[in-house]
Image (tube, helix red, strand yellow):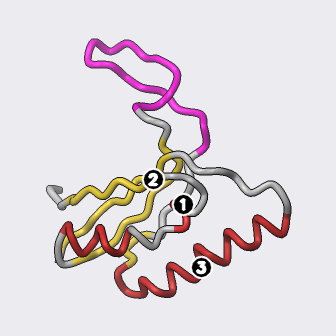
Amino acid sequence: MADFVLLYGGGSMPETEAEQAAVMKAWDDWYKELGSAIKDGGNPFTPAAKTIEKDGSVRDGGQAPLTGYTILTAGSLEEATVLAKGSPVLAGGGSVSVHETFEVM
């Protein structure tokens, strides 16, 4: 088993309270479906970000329009990708990038 970071990009924000409730229910349902595969449910990102370049200079903005993350445990990159296909961010027009990670410290 390995850990995989799901990075979310883009997607729309719900405007009404009813839309917000529906989106939160979709995330809750998906997390229940994932069960013990969830290592860290993650959080959304705010638009505020800074990027530090190799020369030490700093610029406003992130490396990509990232909007949040989740960490899963799965048997392979392919399995994690199948699990990621259920992410509610996709229904909002966003995308999911799946990256294997490992402990080094």
- Tell me, for residue 89, which label it has, or none: 1
Above or below — where is 81 with respect to 64?
A: below
Above or below — where is 23 with respect to 59?
A: below
Q: Quadrant of residue 76?
A: bottom left
88 relative to 21 in the view: left or right:
left
Dot 2 alpha-carbon crowd within 10 angstroms: few under 14, some 14 to 19, many 20 or more = many
- Quick one: SS at disc 1? helix
Q: Is residue 53 magenta?
A: yes
Q: How far, Cα to Cα, is label 2 from label 1?
A: 7 Å
- Tell me, for residue 28, which label it has, or none: 3
Q: Amino acid at mark 3?
A: Asp
Q: Amino acid at mark 1?
A: Val
Dot 3 alpha-carbon crowd within 10 angstroms: few under 14, some 14 to 19, many 20 or more = few
Q: Indicate which label's residue lies in the foreground, 2 or 3.
A: 2
Above or below — where is 31 with respect to 84?
A: below
98 relative to 64 in the view: left or right:
left
Q: How far, Cα to Cα, is label 3 from label 1?
A: 12 Å
- Tell me, for residue 95, which label it has, or none: 2
Q: Quadrant of the C terminus?
A: bottom left
Identify the residue at horizontal 45%, vertical 53% (top origin).
Answer: 95
Sequence order check, earlier mark of 2 and 3: 3
Sequence order check, earlier mark of 3 and 1: 3
Sequence order check, earlier mark of 2 and 1: 1
Identify the residue at horizontal 51%, vertical 86% (top origin).
Answer: 32
Identify the residue at horizontal 14%, vertical 56% (top origin).
Answer: 104
Magenta extent: 46-63
Residue situated furthest right in the rendering: 17
Above or below — where is 74 with respect to 101?
A: below
